[in-house]
Amino acid sequence: MLNMKEWMELIDYKITEGSNYGWSCYGSDAYTLDSWNGVHGPGGYSFSIVFDTVTQTVYQVSAYDYTNNRAYRMINPAYVEQHRKEAKSRDVLVNRAWDDIDYVDLDVDDDFFQKALAIQAGEDYDTRVQITVDFSDEDLLQYMKLAHERDMTFNEFVTQALTEAIQAYDTDPVRFRQQHNL
């Protein structure tokens, strides 16, 4: 999870707003800071952080791309369930960023940074979501060999395998769960 220093450097220390965080899921010392470039619509963006004023724990960071109507968010994994429960108790759509725009939740810090920097620069960026995958050494070697046999990079191989698994799940979730003992 990003820390305060990384977020402040990302926004070049330009704070435009701040207030106590309105929900209780992160505790009574939760505070939010925002950095907005002042542009509504195309060319506009803002970034926000929710953190603890006592411990400096970062609970959540968000990036809002008003040009492309996209919102990205990272919630500290230790607080995801608390956030979800409070959204439910408030009858709020937990994934809604604004109007009919939903958050895309990110898990990898570098993914957030790459998207945020491109949004700031007004550049196109990869909208796919990076994930962390862990393999045993034996599995990693096997998958690298399979990728080599198919004349693919390891990343291309993993991306293809994950894409096929997602498509199989979307086609028939019940069958997918049965086949994979889920």
Image (cartoon, rainbow, N blue to C red):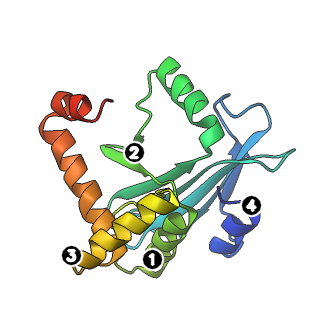
Amino acid type, label 3: Arg
Position in image of residue 178 (x %, y %): 23, 28
Lower position in the chain sequence, tag 1 or tag 2: 2
Which residue is label 4 attached to?
Answer: 4
Lower position in the chain sequence, tag 2 or tag 4: 4
Calculate the distance from the C-alpha at mark 2 to the C-alpha at mark 3.
43 Å
Q: Could you say which disc has been placed on residue 118 in the image?
A: 1
Lower position in the chain sequence, tag 4 or tag 3: 4
Calculate the distance from the C-alpha at mark 2 to the C-alpha at mark 4.
25 Å
Lower position in the chain sequence, tag 3 or tag 1: 1
Instruction: Inspect this view and state whether residue 130 appears.
Output: no
Which mark is nearer the camera, 4 or 3?
A: 3
Position in image of residue 124 (x %, y %): 34, 78
Q: Residues within 10 Å of mark 1 (few under 14, many from 20)?
A: some
Q: Is residue 121 left or right of residue 170?
A: right
Amino acid type, label 1: Ala
Which residue is label 2 attached to?
Answer: 98
Calculate the distance from the C-alpha at mark 3 to the C-alpha at mark 1.
33 Å
Which residue is label 3 attached to?
Answer: 150
Which residue is pictured at 65% across the width and 34% down the height?
Answer: 22
